[in-house]
Image: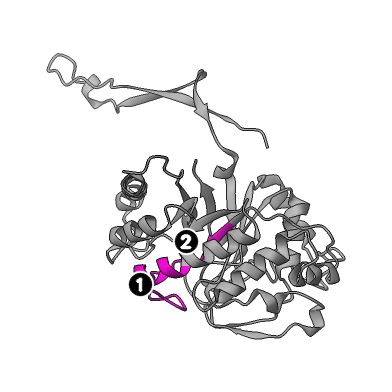
Amino acid sequence: MSRPFLSLVTVIVLFSSFFSSTAPLRAQQAPTARIKIDIDRTIGEVHPHLFGNFTEHLGRMIYGGIYEEGSPLSDQFGYRKDVFDVVKQLNVSILRWPGGNFASGYNWKDGIGPKDQRPTRIDLAWNDLESNRFGTDEFLRYCEMLGTEPYICINAGLGTIDDARHWVEYCNESRHTYWADQRRKNGREEPYKVKYWALGNEIDGPWQMGNKSAEEYSKFALETAKAMRLVDRDIKLVASGSSNYGADWIAWNRTVLQVLRNQADYIAIHTYINNRDNDLERFLAWSQTIDHYIEITAGLIRQAQSGQANPRPLYIAYDEWNVWYRTGNREKLGFSTHSSVTLTL
């Protein structure tokens, strides 16, 4: 994907009101402003991963959204052609799946193999039933159709280290191992070579299945990362940063970064904003809060790297963010209400 350039924007504000007893009419004129965009003054490149997105088994994002078997709007594989055409136009550079909160209770092994033999499970995250008819192969095939980089979030809530390493083996192993051969039985000979993997989702949140303390999560994530890398040393790993900003999120991120600084490539930040109190000024000022989250996390990364002769590069993955403009039950949650993914470099 080509990289657009970020141009310097020069804003010139000209006030035409001058309060003077000799110019009473001019005092009544409203201030005017002029914005000049200087496209000839390039200040840097925009990385393609700034244009990522996220899909979760929530509401109609998967079933009835990008995937709807038997619909006249779908192709022979069950992908909605109308939705695909729109998503294709977005030029999504990286797509995160399967969650989100859903990931913390998801067993990826339920979503492979013959669809009619896949079990229906209770989705504890969103109080729904999960048919598992859309699983790993369906997601990765969709990414290939879109020309999008896949990004998989493992189950660091109720899942195990073995679950995670086996998932990498299923997706990326080229040799004849058990899980690679299971992939072949399911119709995919060549490995998918999934590069980006999240080490869980929002595990500090009390709303999360398998919620852990910073110390508990860091120990689990460290051993999981080691096992996943032993299967594929080329993968990139995203640690679960704090999304529970009402608690001591700085201490959480500090602990995670100190423990995972030699294994993780990114630390994740999530932010959803709304305007439920109808306070426009406060709503627009959220950009300052987001800047604050980034600046603090960047400082914690520098702290974790300090004292190391050759510190491992660590970046921020802002892999859930959006304006959550709807509330209510799952039937009211449409395809467009969830979030975007940004991997900053």
- Asked if labels 2 and 1 touch by Cβ distance under 8 angstroms, the answer is no
Q: CA distance from mark 1 to mark 2?
A: 30 Å
Mark 2 nearby-residue class (10 Å; few <14, some 14–19, many ≥20): some
Q: In the image, is residue 329 above or below residue 97? A: below
Q: Is residue 268 visible?
A: yes
Q: Which amino acid type is marked by label 1?
A: Ser
Which residue is denoted by mark 1 in the rendering? Answer: 213
Toward the viewer: 69 or 261?
Answer: 261
- Asked which secondary structure carries label 2, the reply is loop
Which residue is denoted by mark 2 in the rendering? Answer: 325
Q: Position of residue 217 (x, y in %)?
A: 41, 69
- Which quadrant is home to the N terminus? top right
Label disc, if present, on residue 245 of the rendered structure: none
Q: Position of residue 273 (x, y in %)?
A: 40, 58
Toward the viewer: 311 or 187?
Answer: 311
When asked about the image quadrant of residue 174, the answer is: bottom right
Using residue 141 as the reference point, say whether residue 217 is left or right of it: left
Colour style of the rendered protein structure:
one colour
Mark 1 nearby-residue class (10 Å; few <14, some 14–19, many ≥20): few
- Asked which secondary structure carries label 1, the reply is loop
Magenta span has 202? yes
Using residue 236 as the reference point, say whether residue 24 is left or right of it: left
When asked about the image quadrant of residue 121, the answer is: bottom right
Q: In terms of sequence position, does the residue under pointer 1 or pointer 2 come before the other?
A: 1
Toward the viewer: 295 or 28?
Answer: 295
User: What is the residue that sits farthest to the left in this orientation?
Assistant: 21
Q: Position of residue 342 (x, y in %)?
A: 52, 48
Magenta span has 196? no
Front disc: 1 or 2: 1
Q: Residue at x 78, y 63 (%)?
A: 79
Q: Which amino acid type is marked by label 2?
A: Tyr
Q: Which residues are magenta?
A: 197-220
